[in-house]
């Protein structure tokens, strides 16, 4: 689950871009086009810059099963479906009139009208509806229908998950962007954040025992990122912390010639075991972020 708030201070375009990139990094998307999925709100007559205050979304992973998604497996998501809400100030009547004018496919779920982007029958087609004048919901049809059933008491919601929901409560409200990852996405995150540790024989076992990851990103005069990996035990956290530190040093050495800005960033990164958690902290200035963006540092390696 992830949430992004609109910056409260007057932001520069660089701030917005930087937070967006780090948010995308935090989601570790197997599909590079995920950012475009949320931009479809504009085509529905909703202006994200003026009307949307917060975005909250969750992903349901493809490529893993109920047996392989949890702790102890090495499986990672190969794709996903999305469901989310955009909190803000809307005019449902005018937007729904736009949908009708465009003759978009419409489906009923309880007393809500779900409007399709596309044919409405494609596997990747997204849908959109208003819960009320301050809440717009979007996502894949099956997940939206499940969301509606949760609202009506027909399905159990996230609040019933006694392991995951406390982490959501812990992360909620901390920073411009925050996210909580399940075990499968935590493993994918480790592959993207620290691929260098895979050269250490013990790392794979430690990663498969990881339970969750909490990500917090804030932006003021720069970008401040905090990654908390929840390990299987205190011993695992200490061991994985040492491997991460060695991996960062190795990456720093590799980057000195080809990407000195990345090397400088890695010198500022800290890895601190804390109980059963590893806390990785990174801080970037505006100039560092601009330079890293120019070098395509954050491009996904597919």
Image: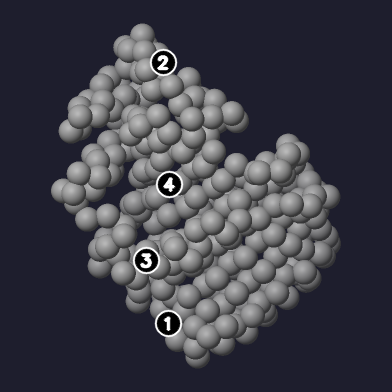
Image quadrant where one finds the N terminus? bottom left
Which mark sits nearer the N-terminus, 4 or 1?
Answer: 4
Q: Is residue 50 above or below residue 10?
A: above
Mark 3 or 1: in front is 3
- Disc 4 on helix, strand or loop? strand
Mark 2 or 1: in front is 2
Which mark sits nearer the N-terminus, 3 or 4?
Answer: 4
Left or right: where 173 falls relative to 145: right
Give residue 94's mark.
2
Q: Which residue is mark 3?
A: 164
C-alpha gap between disc 2 and disc 1? 51 Å
Which mark sits nearer the N-terminus, 3 or 1?
Answer: 3
Query: Dot 1, how many residues are within 10 Å of its Cα: few (below 14), some (14-19), or many (20+)?
Result: some
C-alpha gap between disc 2 and disc 3? 37 Å
Give residue 232's mark.
1
C-alpha gap between disc 3 and disc 1? 15 Å
Name the quadrant containing residue 285: bottom right
User: CB atoms at circles 4 and 1 under 8 Å apart?
Assistant: no
Residue name at image x 20 percent, y 29 percent: 111
Which mark sits nearer the N-terminus, 2 or 3?
Answer: 2
């Amino acid at each position: 689950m992830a949430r992004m708030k609109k910056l409260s201070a007057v932001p520069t375009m660089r701030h917005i871009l930087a937070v967006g990139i780090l948010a995308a990094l935090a989601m570790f998307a197997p599909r590079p086009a995920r950012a475009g999925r949320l931009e479809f709100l504009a085509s529905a007559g909703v202006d994200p810059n003026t009307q949307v205050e917060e975005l909250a979304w969750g992903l349901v992973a493809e490529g893993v099963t109920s047996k392989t998604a949890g702790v102890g497996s090495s499986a990672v998501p190969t794709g996903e479906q999305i469901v989310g809400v955009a909190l803000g100030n809307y005019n449902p009547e005018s937007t729904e009139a736009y949908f009708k004018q465009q003759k978009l496919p419409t489906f009923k779920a309880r007393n809500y009208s779900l409007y399709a982007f596309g044919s409405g029958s494609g596997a990747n087609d997204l849908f959109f509806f208003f819960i009320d004048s301050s809440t717009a919901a979007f996502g894949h049809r099956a997940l939206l229908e499940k969301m509606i059933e949760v609202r009506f008491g027909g399905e159990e919601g996230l609040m019933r998950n006694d392991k995951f929901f406390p982490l959501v409560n812990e992360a909620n409200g901390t920073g411009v962007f925050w996210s909580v990852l399940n075990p499968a996405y935590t493993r994918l995150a480790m592959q993207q954040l620290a691929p260098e540790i895979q050269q250490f024989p013990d790392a794979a076992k430690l990663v498969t025992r990881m339970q969750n990851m909490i990500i917090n990103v804030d932006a003021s005069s720069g970008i401040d990122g905090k990654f908390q990996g929840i390990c299987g035990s205190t011993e695992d956290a200490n061991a994985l912390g040492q491997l991460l530190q060695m991996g960062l040093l190795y990456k720093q050495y590799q980057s000195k010639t080809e990407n000195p800005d990345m090397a400088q960033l890695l010198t500022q990164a800290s890895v601190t075991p804390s109980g059963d958690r590893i806390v990785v902290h990174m801080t970037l200035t505006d100039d560092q972020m601009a330079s890293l963006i120019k070098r395509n540092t954050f491009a996904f390696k597919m």
